[in-house]
Amino acid sequence: MNLYNLNSKFHILVTGGAGFIGSNLCNALLQNGNQVTCLDNFATGKRENLAPLMDNPKFNLIEGDIRNLEDCQNACTGVDYILHQAALGSVPRSINDPITSNDVNVSGFLNMLVAARDAQVKRFIYAASSSTYGDSTNMPKVEDIIGKPLSPYAITKYVNELYADVFSKTYGIETIGLRYFNVFGRKQDPNGAYAAVIPKFVMQLMKHESPVINGDGSFSRDFTYIDNVIQMNVRAMVTKNQNAMNTVYNTAYGERTDLNELTQLLKEYLSDFDPEIKNVENTYGPTRAGDVPHSLASIDKAKELLGYDPQFDIKTGLKEAVNWYWENLK
């Protein structure tokens, strides 16, 4: 396997590697032949996500916390690249507990930047967020036009971008931020109070329960399949284009789907396994605090500077995800 011309000799640290995105990155990098270190405290990550990787001699798990600088420094030893995925996600979670979100997402991020600087890693690539666009009404979202954040989570992710920019200018570290847009796919957790909409709806539909749509279902998102995200992370590592450094990129497909359309597609694909699912009716609830009504990314910058070429649109990605959930969760 040659993953977008990624040199298999590189040693790559994935923070939050036991999470949904992190574990998919670890798996892809190991298949490419890379040495991979995972740093995770299992606050939200899952050991079962790493179980298939544990016997690989090129995989190293460090159980630690990015809020502890020593753990970060230990994880960065001998590392070429860092893919920083560790964070406390979820807008509602940050509204309920802004202090912990800030501790992990801001203080933890700063610890990782310091450790990366001291270890002289080649490049620091980090998970930014589409929540940074805040109350901006511009559509599609372009990287250099943002609004005011609408949640504590959004503030923390914007602060990450500011810190990365300052570290690039002050210490000469190469940084690239990837503003993720509603990532979905295999291994995404359907359980818990802060579960993402797609796995949550899949699980409810499989049980013949009505999915609860916040608002009238007209809110839309640029849903992005996990394999597109893996591609972006790898392209951010392999690029030699100096004009591509020390900036941020939308990581998305470039199309939007509203929640009513999404639910209809899920019913259609799941009914291939269980025809009764197509008859499950939707339930509509109140709009969530901090929710952005519409989200659509321009991916022109990533195409131009990184050579990004997403292969999975919403329908192709949903079919893959539904098949995985049916095999693993029923």
Image (cartoon, rainbow, N blue to C red):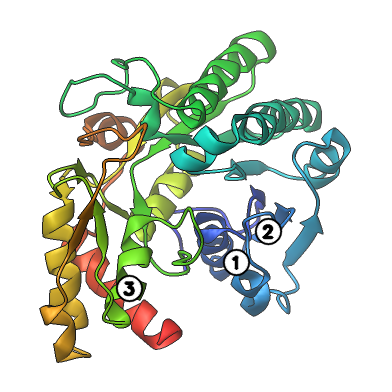
- The residue tagged 1 is 30
Q: Secondary structure at mark 2?
A: strand
Q: Label 1: few (<14), some or many (≥20) within 10 Å? A: some
Q: Is residue 200 left or right of residue 246?
A: left
x 26%, y 37%: residue: 303
Q: Earlier in the sequence, mark 1 or mark 3?
A: 1
Q: Which mark is residue 36?
A: 2
Residue at the farthest top position: 170
x 37%, y 65%: residue: 200
The C terminus sits in image quarter: bottom left
Q: Is residue 190 left or right of residue 9?
A: left
Q: Earlier in the sequence, mark 1 or mark 2?
A: 1
- The residue tagged 3 is 204
Q: Label 3: few (<14), some or many (≥20) within 10 Å? A: some
Q: Is residue 228 left or right of residue 16?
A: left
Q: Position of residue 108 (x, y in %)?
A: 71, 33
Q: Secondary structure at mark 1?
A: helix
x 24%, y 35%: residue: 299
Q: Is residue 159 above or below residue 289?
A: above
Q: Is residue 292 visible?
A: yes
Amino acid type at image mark 2: Val
Q: Is residue 126 visible?
A: no
* Cα gap from disc 1 to disc 2, whole angstroms: 7 Å
Amino acid type at image mark 1: Leu
- Residues marked 1 and 2 touching at CB (< 8 Å): yes
